[in-house]
Image (tube, helix red, strand yellow):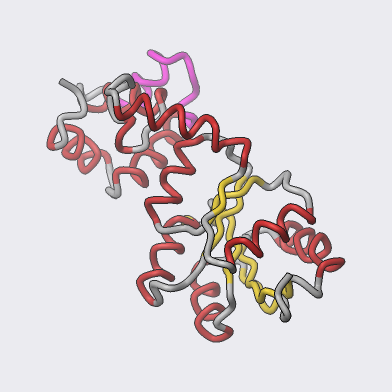
């Protein structure tokens, strides 16, 4: 255990989650000390640059932004910054995105207080930590990606369903048409589109189609 506690800033757009994390970490204040918190990306940048914590513990999804984008932004400001993403998603594609963004760790929200503290201490010591629930699947997925045994768009981080949605977009199908084809609601399709745009780093439908064609995702 370190002589001084690991100083962390919490970032989550739900006040209840922030309070829950602080309550969870309180019994371990000799090892981990919450020095600040933020509820959105802009506030987080100010708090982190002002307090210079050892670690930023951030939710993967923030209202109006992404924890992944915040991670990239904070690392642009300080490449030595250590940021751990906390998520409810045990999908290995989110893990791959987190690692590509430069995160020092990817942990699931059902983690216990003792385990969270232990993992934060490992990050502070210079390690990169991954929740065991997704680590095994990630290794298998990486092996299949390397052998080419996967769906179109997997190398760009798209899930199988997102790949399907993108393929229909390339053919010019509307959101309503895609929803009917997949037997889902239009809001579900829109949710997939937002995820596709984020992963392909584009802002609209035309940009996503352009990337799909340029990268030869569908052959």
At x 37%, y 47%, the residue is: 198
Residues rendered magenta in the picture: 174-188
Q: How many marks?
A: 0
- The answer to whether 187 appears left or right of 77 in the picture is right
In the image, residue 205 lies at what x, y percent? 26, 39
Relative to the observer, which residue lies in front, 157 or 79? 79
- The answer to whether 185 appears left or right of 27 in the picture is left
Residue farthest along the bottom direction in this orientation? 50
At x 69%, y 79%, the residue is: 35
At x 19%, y 23%, the residue is: 218
Q: Can you say whether 190 is above or below 38 in the image?
A: above
Q: Can you say whether 205 is above or below 170 in the image?
A: below
In the image, residue 34 lies at what x, y percent? 72, 74
User: Residue 2 falls in which quadrant of the image?
Assistant: bottom right
Q: Can you say whether 77 is above or below 149 in the image?
A: below
Q: Main secondary structure of the magenta part?
A: helix
User: Residue 140 falls in which quadrant of the image?
Assistant: top left
Residue farthest along the left direction in this orientation? 214
- The answer to whether 182 appears left or right of 24 in the picture is left
Q: Quadrant of the N terminus?
A: bottom right
In the image, residue 128 lies at what x, y percent? 52, 56
Q: Quadrant of the C terminus?
A: top left
At x 40%, y 23%, the residue is: 160
């Amino acid at each position: 255990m370190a002589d001084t506690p690991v100083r962390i800033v919490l970032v989550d757009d739900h006040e209840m989650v922030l309070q829950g994390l602080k309550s969870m970490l309180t019994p371990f204040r000799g090892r981990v000390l919450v020095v600040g918190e933020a509820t959105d990306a802009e506030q987080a940048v100010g708090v982190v640059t002002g307090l210079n914590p050892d670690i930023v513990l951030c939710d993967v999804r923030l209202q109006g932004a992404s924890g992944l984008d915040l991670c990239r932004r904070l690392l642009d400001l300080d490449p030595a910054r250590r940021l751990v993403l906390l998520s409810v998603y045990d999908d290995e594609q989110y893990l791959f995105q987190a690692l590509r963004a430069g995160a020092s760790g990817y942990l699931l929200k059902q983690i216990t207080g003792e385990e969270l503290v232990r993992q934060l201490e490992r990050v502070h010591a210079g390690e990169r930590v991954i929740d065991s629930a997704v680590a095994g699947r990630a290794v298998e997925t990486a092996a299949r990606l390397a052998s080419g045994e996967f769906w179109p768009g997997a190398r760009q981080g798209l899930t199988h369903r997102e790949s399907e949605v993108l393929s229909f977009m390339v053919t010019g199908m509307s959101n309503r048409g895609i929803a009917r084809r997949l037997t889902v609601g239009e809001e579900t399709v829109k949710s997939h589109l937002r995820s596709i745009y984020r992963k392909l780093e584009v802002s609209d439908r035309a940009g996503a189609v352009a990337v799909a064609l340029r990268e030869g995702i569908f052959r």
